[in-house]
Structure formats: structure tokens, C-alpha cells
Amino acid sequence: MTRSRFVAAISRCLTARHLSRSGQFGSLASGLLLLAGLSLSGSQVMADGEFRISAIPDEAPTELIRKFEPMADYLSKALDMDVSFVPVTDYAATVEALVSDQIDMAWLGGFTYVQAAQRSDGKVEPIVQRAEDERFQSVFITQSDSPIQSVADLKGVNFTFGSPSSTSGHLMPRHFLSEEGIDVDNDLSVAFSGAHDATAFAVAGGRVDAGALNIKVWEKLVNEQKVDTDKLRVFYTTPEYHDYNWTIRSGLSAELRQKLIDAFVSLDMNDPEDKIILDLQRATRFVPSQASFYEGIKQAAFEAELLAKP
């Protein structure tokens, strides 16, 4: 099996925290330098026979490498070509790298997929998602001795989301807060932790009163005993929505697209080697995805003025 090569990103790019509330990416001059060593044209990306993948940095960098190295190795074998995982510094960088053909495929949240689709005029395509992403949720957490018992108790508190571009760490929690009668910008004192695990640690450390994060990351932190459930508790779980997917750039051949779908869908929990990969992805299996699944997220982004209507 061909060993994947990791390409380090050494240029700091425009941070997601600096995005405007309209969801526009603003000046991305630095974004074109976001992947030093990947300043290649779209035609060059595949010319060397290497397939490049990336992912939104919704967890610590070391965790992302641990999750995606086995996946890159698996795809190397399935595609019969070198596959490298390219770490990036923030959500906006991942989107920009995909739509500018600096990478070939990215693990995106529902909102970052919607942003990428708009930025590229529909020239990106979600091909697969975890079965779990068909019915995804976010959780709101606080300290166990906090007086916060429901969403209604959040008015006036210090609250943290993850990244501004996160589906499960910002957009959908914001959407459901609005449905519950909370005006996020006026009723809360809002901060952004940058990642789901960082949100949990910020609440645990008392730096904020409460926060919202991806339910799968919360469950992982609990199972790995990285958070103490005697000190932290969930007080609200959102309704379900579609979330993460693997999205490819335009220009990939139909043959390669199908090989990718087949490689993901064929991962089987009953195969010991496949189970390692699926467990790292916090998935039971992968299923085909499509753009229409994310219309609800697009509408939520429009309503929250986090995405400008074209």
C-alpha cells in the first residue's frame, strides 16, 4: 500500500473569525498563499499522479492527522495513486483551496459545502457522507452546577460557538436558538472557540457559561474521558439536520468520481481494517450524498445573514 505524504501548510491564511457576517470571504490574497507548497494550478494538481485531500479543522491538528492518515492510505490503495492529506489552518482556507483547485477533495461541514458551492458557482459536488450525517445534531453544554437548565436561561450569559463557518458548532445552533426565541447577537455575549473540542474545554474551564458543539465530538470526548461528566452536562440537543460530506472539485473524471464513491461505500465494519478507518471517522458506514440534502442549511445561512444571497 502506498504511504500517504503529509504536506505542511506554513503560510497563515485569512482566519475564519475575520469573515464578515454576510459569509463573504473578503480579501483572499493571503488565501492564495494558504498552502505553501501547494501553489499549483488545477491542471498540475493531478498531473503528478497525486490526489490531494483536506478537511475543515474542526478539531485539534493532531487529532485531524490521526483521523485522516489511515483514510489517505486506504484511498491510495483504492485509487492506485498517491493520496496526501493537506492540513489547513481554518475553515475558509479549506473552501478556498477546493474551489481554486489546490486540492481535489475535502471533508466539509454542511455550511462549508454550501459556501464552496456558492464560491465556485456550483462547480463542487458532495459525493458521500456518513450515515450519521443524515440525522446530525448539536449539543449545548454547561457546568453541572450552573443555573442554566434550558435555552430560555441563556439570555445574558457568555456563550461560545466553534468556528463561525461551522455547521454544527455555529450555524445550526444559531438557527435553533433563533427558533427558540433567542436573539443571538443581542441576548448573548458571544465568543468563538475555533473548534468543537475547544468549546468543551472553554466551558469546562469556566471561561464561558455555555457552548454549542458537534454531538459526535462531545460523545468522543466523554468516551475518551477528556471531559468530566460530573462537572459538565448537556442541557439541550438540537433537532436533526444533514451535515458533513466529502466534496470533490470540478474537473475530476467520471471514472475517478465513481472509484471514490465505491471506495467509501465499500468500507465495512465487519472488516477489521475497515473498522479502524470507520471508527476514526466516527462512522458506521458511508452513503452517497447529493447537493439537495443541504438546501435547509443554505436557507438557515441566508436567514442568519451568514451567507449572502446571490
Image (cartoon, rainbow, N blue to C red):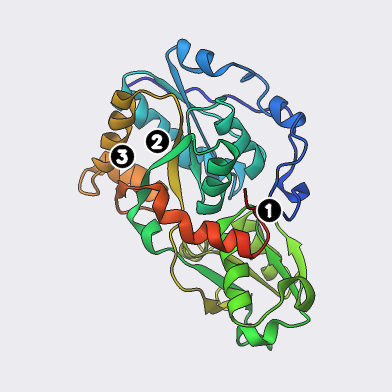
Asked whether residue 68 is in view, the answer is: yes
The answer for how far apart the CA atoms under marks 3 and 2 are is: 10 Å
Amino acid on which the number 2 mark rests in the picture: Met
**Residue that mark 2 sits on:** 71
In three-dimensional space, the C-alpha distance between marks 2 and 1, rounded to whole angstroms, equals: 24 Å
Q: Residue 100: x and y, percent? A: 59, 27
Q: Secondary structure at mark 1?
A: loop
Seen as rendered, the residue at the extreme top is 48
- Disc 1 from disc 3: Cα separation: 28 Å
Q: Which residue does the image show at 76% across and 29% down from the upper left? A: 29
Give the residue drawn at x 43%, y 63%: 136
Determine the secondary structure under disc 2: helix
Is residue 10 something that shows in the picture? no
Q: Is residue 24 above or below residue 170?
A: above
Which residue in the structure is indicated by mark 1? Answer: 194
Q: Earlier in the sequence, mark 3 or mark 2?
A: 2
Residue occupied by mark 3: 264
Which of the 4 quarters of the picture holds residue 241?
bottom left
Instruction: Please give left or right for residue 146 compared with residue 6 in the image.
Output: right
Q: Residues within 10 Å of mark 3 (few under 14, many from 20)?
A: many
- Name the quadrant of the N terminus: top left
